[in-house]
Image (cartoon, rainbow, N blue to C red):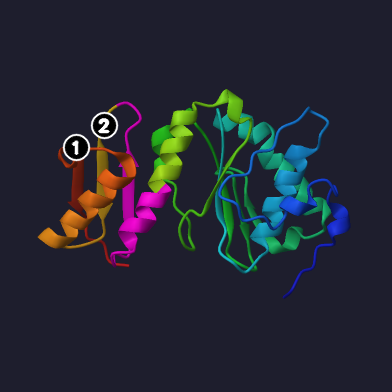
Amino acid sequence: MNIKISKQVFNEVYIPFLDNEDRYLIFYGGGSSGKSYFIAQRWVYRLLHPKRHNILMVRQTADSNRKSTFPLMKQVITNWNISEHFKINETDMRIVCKLTGNEVAFAGLDDVEKIKSITFANGELTHIWCEEATEMKMEIVSAMEKELILENMVKSLGFSDAVVAVSTTSDNVNVFINSAELNYDTALSIYNMMKNETGIVSGNVIIMPVYAET
């Protein structure tokens, strides 16, 4: 099923950003600027797109999400009369598009370890949406983005899955790979990736093969 969303539903000021693929998009303005509503619209629009979009939406606390961004996205879905095409989990604060399998998960930076364990049913995390970024610990957000990049780099070596944990309080990186064993050449490649991307010396990089059938 092909759902078409008229661009008339968007504030024309923000339309140039609707399909923008820049690595970073920063929106700022007053409370009546409509930026948060447009961002919610943009992500609902992207969830409907066949290209993979798995989004992690973070604010300072999970409770602030439950009172703001989560209901805002539900409001957009309702206003566009497309509720039947979405599965909404009120308890876990997740929204899944039934047509594409694309998903958005909402979390708070008050539980960073829980954020690191977030997974998606279809594919990997592709985007991070930071609402009210000025209230956040930006080093945590930076580490989350760096982990996403590093995980994709490690998987490019042929691993079906990988998890990278970059510490925000020390110069340590833990790398978990889905493999029964690890040879010297592959370990060296991973060490060099971590060193080049983070500047952390190889002695502070721990690689752990953890085999799991997929």
Can you name the residue that lies furthest to the right here? 8
Report the amino acid beneath label 2: Asp
Q: What element carries label 2?
A: loop
What residue does disc 2 label? 171
State which quadrant residue 161 falls in. bottom left
**Other-residue count near label 2 (Cα within 10 Å), few / some / many at <14 / 14–19 / ≥20:** some
Q: Which image quarter is the N terminus in?
A: bottom right
Can you name the residue that lies furthest to the left here? 184
Q: Is residue 140 visible?
A: yes
Alpha carbons under labels 2 and 1: distance apart:
7 Å
What residue does disc 1 label? 204
Q: Is residue 161 visible?
A: no
Magenta stretch: residue 153 in it?
Answer: yes
Q: Nearer the viewer, residue 17 or 55?
A: 17
Looking at the image, is 155 positioned above or below residue 198? below
Report the amino acid beneath label 1: Asn
Q: What element carries label 1?
A: helix
Of pointers 2 and 1, the one earlier in the residue sequence:
2
Q: Residue 39 placed where, x, y %?
A: 71, 45
Q: Give the range drawn in magenta.
A: 148-169
Looking at the image, is 61 positioned above or below residue 49? above
**Other-residue count near label 1 (Cα within 10 Å), few / some / many at <14 / 14–19 / ≥20:** some
Q: Residue 125 placed where, x, y %?
A: 48, 53
Q: Residue 26 placed where, x, y %?
A: 64, 39
Q: Which image quarter is the C terminus in?
A: bottom left
State which quadrant residue 190 falls in. bottom left
Which numbered circle lies on residue 39? none
Task: Write the residue at 21% across / 55% down.
Answer: 210
Q: Which of 186 and 45 is in front in this view?
A: 186
Query: Do callouts 2 and 1 mark residues in contact (Cβ within 8 Å)?
Result: yes
Task: Write the residue at 85% across / 47% down.
Answer: 11
User: How many marks on residues?
Assistant: 2
